[in-house]
Amino acid sequence: MRTTIKKDFSVEEPIEKVWDYLANPTKIVTCVPGASITEEIDDRNFKGEVSMKFGPVKAKYSGEITIQELDVEAKNMVMKGRGLDSKGKGSADMIMNGNLKPTEKGTDVSFSMEVSIIGMLAQFGSRLINDVSDQLLNQFVTNFKAKLAGSDEVDNSINAGAMVGTIVKNKIGGLFGGKKEKEQEEQKPKEETSK
Amino acid sequence: MGHSIKRKEDARFIQGKGNYVDDIKLPGMLHMDIVRSPYAYAKIKSINAEEALKIPGVIAVVTGKDLEKYNLHWMPTLMSDTQMVLPTDTVMYQAQEVAAVIATDRYAARDGKEAVMVDYEPMKPVIDPFKALDEDAPVLRTDKEGKTDNHIWNWSVGDKDATDKLFNSADVTVKEQMHIPRIHVASIETCGCVADYNKVENHLTMYMTTQAPHAIRTVIALVAGHVGLTEEKVRVISPDIGGGFGGKVPVYPGYVIAIAVSFLVGKPVKWIEDRSENLQADSFARDYHITAEMAATKEGKIQGIRFKLLADHGYTDAAANPSKFPTGLFSICTGSYDYGTAYLEADAVYTNKPPGGVAYRCSFRVTEAVHAIERITDRLALEIGKDPAQLRFENFIKKEDFPWKSPTGWEYDSGDYHAGLEKAMNAIEYDALRKEQEEKRARGEMMGIGISTFTEIVGAGPSKDFDILGIKMFDSAEIRVHPTGKAIARFGTKSQGQGHETTYAQIIAEELGIPAEHIQIEEGDTDTAPYGLGTYASRSTPTAGAAAAVAARKLRDKARKIAAYLLEVSEEDLEWEPGKFFVKGAPEKTKTIQEIVFAAYTNHPQGMEAGFEATHYYDPPNLTFPSGAYICVVDIDKETCEIKVRRFVAIDDCGNIINPMIVQGQVHGGLTQGIAPAMYEELIYDEDGNILNGTLMDYLVPTAVESPSWETGHTITPSPHHPIGAKGVGESPTVGAPPAIANAIVDALSPYGITHMDIPITPYKVWKVLKEKGVVE
């Protein structure tokens, strides 16, 4: 089960400062909800953990995070994460791409995240994966902005209950609020199964 | 016969007194739960049971390596393919059994399952059956020596050259690519068993949800004979079954693991699947990709068909077809129409999906065949601009042309297709509907009328062509009449809700004159019932029902001899009317069947064997060919694309009817299981092999809410070769309904240039196709 989502936003900070955060794995990873770095192998490879909880299904993925690309000229960062569920219930892959463009006021930031999940979580979460990923990236962006603004403490805990609540609110809001501005590119499952 | 007597079995079912496998509780019984793979394709690096074994109540965790020591880690499928019981190194589909947890209660077993740690090394799975045949596709069945691709078998029937020639020269040819989706029987009771091995006696009693207890006993003996479980040491008991529909024909790994564990520990072991396991791991049905073509004259005379199939069997060919027919009875795809040229070619492939290919409420792939022929017939009608009913009338095999030889080698026994369609059209007021449709179309409204005039092929089958694992597909009945004139009859078949306890009793009552209420029917215990291949493919009435009639006639012959002896006349002087013999010309001189039976035990003629029992193994001379004419009317909302089945008329011809109420019940249930794949059901896998609707929350089984009010009726064309002229009906509605619904929906959408839609046809699919055509925004 795969999905790709995108977020674009602008910050009023000089590009070099933003890049400093983007290019620093320890700063970037702590912005990812539920993620933590457990071991630094070298400056590009890390061991880490990501926890997820979805209704009855809990998953704790442990695996490796690799900075695949760190292009100072193009201000482009590609980070790849691959984790196996610690109980053997499945695996998750993530590729995150961050790109910066200077503007007159500051910097345009563009994030995309491609998530692929195999196993129990995929079975139960197929209808919600887009929304969950969207929510994760939103929280990530909030954290990223907070870090940039100088805050040391960000909330990168994962709270499934609150998350499901937010998703339901957004979904219902979307239903009644006319056309919702959709930033994400959804890759729908093969066929819509619900009536 | 012909009476709607109430079902004898319902007395216990409606009072909650049925006895299902999960009701069986034996002293010292252990419980089993199964660890399943999250991956569609992965190497198993290690299985760590340490944490699981710490849980109070958990006594063992069994892996493939454990079973390997006894050579019980693999088993044959009914198609003579092979299947893992538990893997030793590789998992081949999501939800595959990986290890079994044995515990003193169900809850500890489930906790233990959660605690087993399996370390996998995932591999890229093969999910798309077409890509499975690519040259660079990884070879999945490396366990098979010399296997260099994912191809399983190729099968063909018909005259290829003549068919190709016809298609090159015909006035009109039409072609559609269809997919009959992977679905699941989703019976209300999941699968399960209690394996009870007695070490002292070296005897296994296996209580299990099986539609074919005797065949299972033979399979167990084949798999476990080498450890001492030879066939006389095995007793299979199939208690009440909550729906089978073909899904309870195969042997699932869980059964074998339970047997192995009971064998090793000497205690009974219960295994009951949960709902998701049932849906995700047990044999699926259908999953045929079909290229269907039809050739005709420009006037609309059908001249031939050409079908090409690709069957996705998943990890192993675990279908349940007769050995000679790897694609089942798909060759009935010539339909109800009169032409002499046909060619059908089928290939099957392995993919990283659960194994199967069971005949879900259909006689071995007849559903797929009927869908293809009925859809492509409608496609032809659309192409040449002829009303689909008219096109069918002009092409039907005429009733005087039976027995009719099909270009794929079958001999249709009897039928009257014109009468069936006429009756259906009158019932639904076809002409008025077409007029209404014309008016609605002018207003831009979407209404469709769909017809399906199918021919089934059931009652497998004649021993010259039909066997499973070499065992011929006869079936059996044994009747014992007690001295007081009451009877017990036992059968090789096994009811899963079909009402055998009533209908078999009615057949015997008709032949012997003993009231049906005094005839006890027993099935499902291999120690007492005569050998038979079980209940599926609408075969019970055509085979075991016939066996009952013939066995009863044997007894009637004996009764005549006894009556002649008692009345001191010759046998020729006697006349039979149900329940008694009387002397011709002297009707006051009679002996009732009860008096005759009593004499068989108390005063039988010298030289005659005492007692009143008969057994018959019935080997049908031919299959039976039930048919039906179904018409469906749908309305589609242009705003929401919601599809509403407004009316559905089903006229079935199943030959002589034993119990009209039971037939009607069968038809209602079958129609509901027909609307299911047409509009709702499909097992969906993503490119990684994740099942995306593995629970009943997402896999939509229609309920009473979705079911229209079915309008049923029948025509009767008896089978000329069946002892009571019956043909079998259980599956006709499941087979006939989907194309009627699909044809109606396509008919509604045809003004917008739509010629075909794959089932299940959902509002989303309708919206998508209408958007593509620019009809909706």
Image: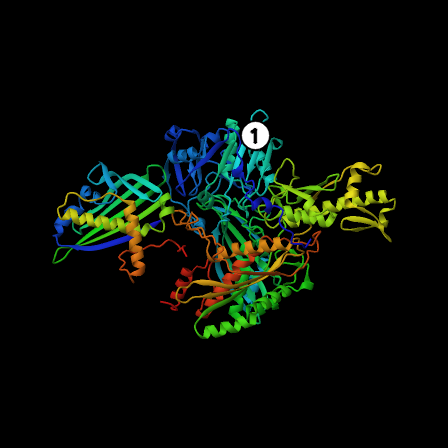
| Residue B40: quarter of image | top left
The C terminus of chain B sits in image quarter:
bottom left
Q: Residue drawn 23% across and 54% down?
A: A7
> Where residue B227 appears, x then y in whole percent?
55, 28
The amino acid marked with disc number 1 is His
Secondary structure beneath dot 1 equals: helix
Vertical placement of residue B326 versus A183, above or below: above
Question: Considering depth in this image, is B30 or A59 the residue closer to the camera?
Answer: B30
Instruction: Say how many tags the image has.
Output: 1
Q: Is residue B50 left or right of residue B568?
A: left
Q: Residues within 10 Å of mark 1 (few under 14, many from 20)?
A: few
Look at mark 1 in the image and give the residue it sits on.
B226
Q: Position of residue B168 (x, y in %)?
A: 54, 65
Answer whether residue A149 is visible to the viewer in this image: yes
Q: Outermost residue toward the front?
A: B15
Above or below, B682 against A118 in this view is below
Residue B289 percent across, percent down from the top left? 49, 55
The front one of B26 and B103 is B26
- Residue B86, percent from left and from top: 46, 35
The vertical placement of B431 against B357, above or below, is below
Query: Which chain is indicated by disc 1?
Result: B
Left or right of B548: which side holds B303?
Answer: left
Q: Nearer the viewer, residue B527 or A137?
A: B527
Using the rendered image of the protein, determine whether residue B157 is visible from the camera's viewpoint: no
Protein image colouring: rainbow
* Residue situated furthest top in the rendering: B200
* Residue B342 vs residue B737, the one in the foreground: B737
Horizontal side of residue B140 vs B519, given as left or right:
left
